[in-house]
Every structure is written in structure tokens, then in C-alpha cells.
Image (cartoon, rainbow, N blue to C red):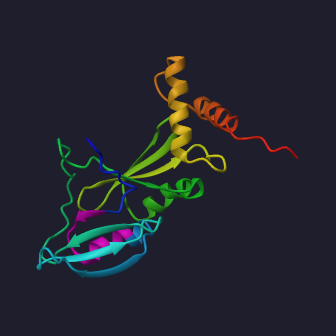
């Protein structure tokens, strides 16, 4: 059976409450530029807002001025989204706790072994993660290349999770695969 080959995330669409609530959170708190809006062509009582999460793709939010913010945790059940993670630089990650506190946004911070994470919720209870890798992929490689190699090393060594040592060794192993230039 032939597969359909996807080439990345095109966009993510969320069900929101009001236009202003969406703009205040996605642009105001998380700095995603508001790109444009138009009616939701599939549901005329809703509006459709488009934001740039930083990679030129889109995060969109359906809004309805009659719906208040949910102010509860989004369901965590089979078939539901657990959270959406956004990449941030190390500099932004280090500034995020103070900036979230200034806005009165609650969050938790976690060390995930190969990355650091901050979790918060949007006004409708969706869990959002700000994620920052603990490594920079070498030129010519992607983060996923480093992570796949680090996973192989972790499994080979019988370790429970990827650590910074696995990352460093993975980068070293990847660099050994580069063709050497004869100068």
C-alpha cells in the first residue's frame, strides 16, 4: 500500500472564544504576529484569525464574540490534543518565566533531558509548551538527526532517557559522517 507523504505541518487551528482574547494571548503574550482575519467559510457565525508562530506557517483560531473564555483545562482524553509545543531560543526561554509572571500567567518548568520546557495554558485551557533544545544541530544536520542518533545511543547503552551526554556523543557521531575535504 502506498503512503501519502506529508512534508510538515501546514497549520494548526484552534477553537477559541473572542477575537480580542485570541489576539491578547497569541500575539500579546506569545509574540505571534497577527497576520489576517476573515470569516470562517465553513461556519458563518465564526471568524478565523491567522497568526505566524515564527516559522512562516500558520496557527489559526476560530472565534465567536458570543463565547466567553472557557477558563478550564481542555479535556485530556483519547482523541484530544494534549498540548502544542513551540520552539523558543535559549535567550527567550530564560526570559519567559519573568515575562509570564508579569502577565499573571501561571506556568510550570520542566527538564526533559534533551530539552527544557515551560507549560502554560491559553484562556480556553489549551496547554501550550515553550520548548528549547539543549543543543544546536551541526551545520548540515537537523535537530531530528541529532535526536535520532541520541536515541540510538541511549538504547545501545540501556539508559532510560536521552541526556546531555547522549546529545554530545550523537553530534560527535554525526560529524564523523561528513566527508572530509582534502585541502
Q: Does residue 14 belong to the magenta stretch?
A: yes
Q: Residue at x 38, y 77 (%)?
A: 34
User: What residue do we see at 54% from left, 46% from top?
Assistant: 143
- Per the image, is 15 magenta? yes
Q: Quadrant of residue 24?
A: bottom left
In percent of width and height, residue 21 lies at 28, 72
For the magenta stretch, what is the residue range? 12-26
Q: How many labels sit on residues?
A: 0
- Relative to 124, is 51 on the left or the right? right
Closer to us: 160 or 31: 160
* Image point (66%, 46%), residue name: 138
x, y percent for residue 101: 44, 59
Q: Is residue 171 left or right of residue 129?
A: right
Going by the picture, which residue comes out furthest to the front?
1
131 vs 103: above or below: above
65 over 58 or under it: above or below: below
Does 126 sit left or right of 118 as displayed? left
Give the residue drawn at x 20%, y 66%: 69
Amino acid at each position: 500500500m502506498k503512503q501519502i507523504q506529508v512534508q510538515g505541518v501546514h497549520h494548526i487551528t484552534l477553537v477559541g472564544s473572542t477575537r480580542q482574547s485570541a489576539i491578547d494571548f497569541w500575539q500579546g503574550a506569545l509574540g505571534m504576529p497577527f497576520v489576517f482575519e476573515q470569516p470562517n467559510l465553513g461556519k458563518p457565525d465564526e471568524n478565523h484569525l491567522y497568526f505566524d508562530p515564527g516559522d512562516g506557517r500558520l496557527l489559526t483560531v476560530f472565534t465567536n464574540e458570543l463565547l466567553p473564555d472557557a477558563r478550564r483545562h481542555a479535556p485530556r482524553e483519547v482523541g484530544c490534543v494534549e498540548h502544542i509545543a513551540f520552539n523558543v531560543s535559549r535567550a527567550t526561554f530564560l526570559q519567559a518565566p519573568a515575562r509570564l509572571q508579569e502577565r499573571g500567567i501561571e506556568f510550570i518548568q520542566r527538564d526533559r533531558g534533551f530539552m527544557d520546557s515551560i507549560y502554560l495554558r491559553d484562556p480556553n485551557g489549551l496547554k501550550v509548551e515553550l520548548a528549547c533544545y539543549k543543543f544546536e544541530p551541526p551545520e548540515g544536520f537537523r535537530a531530528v538527526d541529532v535526536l535520532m542518533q541520541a536515541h540510538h545511543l541511549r538504547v545501545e547503552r540501556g539508559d532510560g532517557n536521552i541526556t546531555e551526554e547522549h546529545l554530545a556523543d550523537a553530534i560527535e557521531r554525526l560529524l564523523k559522517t561528513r566527508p572530509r575535504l582534502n585541502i
